[in-house]
Amino acid sequence: MGSYSVTIQLDNAWIDNFNKTGMKLCMAKATKDSSGKEYFNVIAKTVDSVQPQMTITWVEEYKIEATAITFSKGAQISGTAGAKDINFGQTYQIQSWNKTQVFMDTQNVEKDSFGFANNIPCSIMLSMKDGNSFVPVYISEEVVIPGMTTLTPIPKVVFWFQKTVASQTMIVNTSGTPWYVTPTAGSNSTIKYDKNGVWSQVLQ
């Protein structure tokens, strides 16, 4: 599981305006469900005071859990507990709220995915390592009926600017103009937001 880094260059023309009006840099990360659909439905990180250059880093280490929290646009995830470490090719199984386990499951789970097997209705929460803690990056948009499904974290993130939001907020769509980045593990990608409000990739 690699480490990733994206540097965001913000034109000086926006700095004072964004900070005075409470405009934040937001990031969400992609997770693919068993149908192949990509989701960016939790704000993983925000930068509350923007600067001319900001670097966002993360590590692909994950925790997974079953939760009674249900998806609600604009609500902030809080109070989660009971998450377990999970590696690619493993399945998280919940038999009851007090009985969960993680095990290798190469017969049912691809080497770049996670399995989720549940005996009770629940939502799936996936969190990613951010510094010394873990932050939610995905929650199932519907309660999952008992059965087996898979999730695949994708090294793809989206950035945008938005007011009055916070990390761990559930979202349906990004606000304003988003910019998608697929960085490479172990190297830095750079993007910029120019004085005209246009995103672009900076060639290395």
Image (cartoon, rainbow, N blue to C red):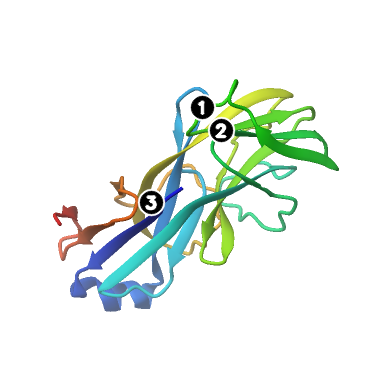
What residue lies at 47% left-to-right and 60% top-to-bottom?
45
The answer, for residue 111, to whether it is visible in the render is yes
203, above or below 108, in the image: below
Amino acid, disc 2: Gly
Marks 3 and 2, Cα distance to the nearest angstrom? 34 Å
Marks 3 and 1, Cα distance to the nearest angstrom? 33 Å
Q: Which residue is mark 1?
A: 110
Question: Helix, strand, or loop for circle 1?
Answer: loop
Q: Position of residue 19 (x, y in %)?
A: 35, 76
Marks 1 and 2, Cα distance to the nearest angstrom? 6 Å
Q: Considering depth in this image, is 22 or 113 the residue closer to the camera?
A: 113
Q: Earlier in the sequence, mark 3 or mark 1?
A: 1
The answer to whether residue 107 is left or right of residue 44 is: right
Amino acid, disc 1: Glu
Residue 139: quarter of image: top right
Quadrant location of the C terminus in the rendered image: bottom left
Disc number for residue 175: 3
85, above or below 8, in the image: above
Q: Earlier in the sequence, mark 3 or mark 2?
A: 2
What residue lies at 44% left-to-right and 58% top-to-bottom?
58
Label 3 crowding class (10 Å Cα cut-off): few <14, some 14-19, many 20+?
few
Question: Helix, strand, or loop for circle 3?
Answer: loop
Disc number for residue 89: 2
Q: Are marks 1 and 2 in contact (CB under 8 Å)?
A: yes
Q: Position of residue 63 (x, y in %)?
A: 62, 48
Amino acid, disc 3: Ser
Question: Helix, strand, or loop for circle 2?
Answer: loop
Q: Looking at the image, is mark 3 or mark 2 nearer the viewer?
A: 2
Q: Looking at the image, is mark 3 or mark 1 nearer the viewer?
A: 1
Residue 142: quarter of image: top right
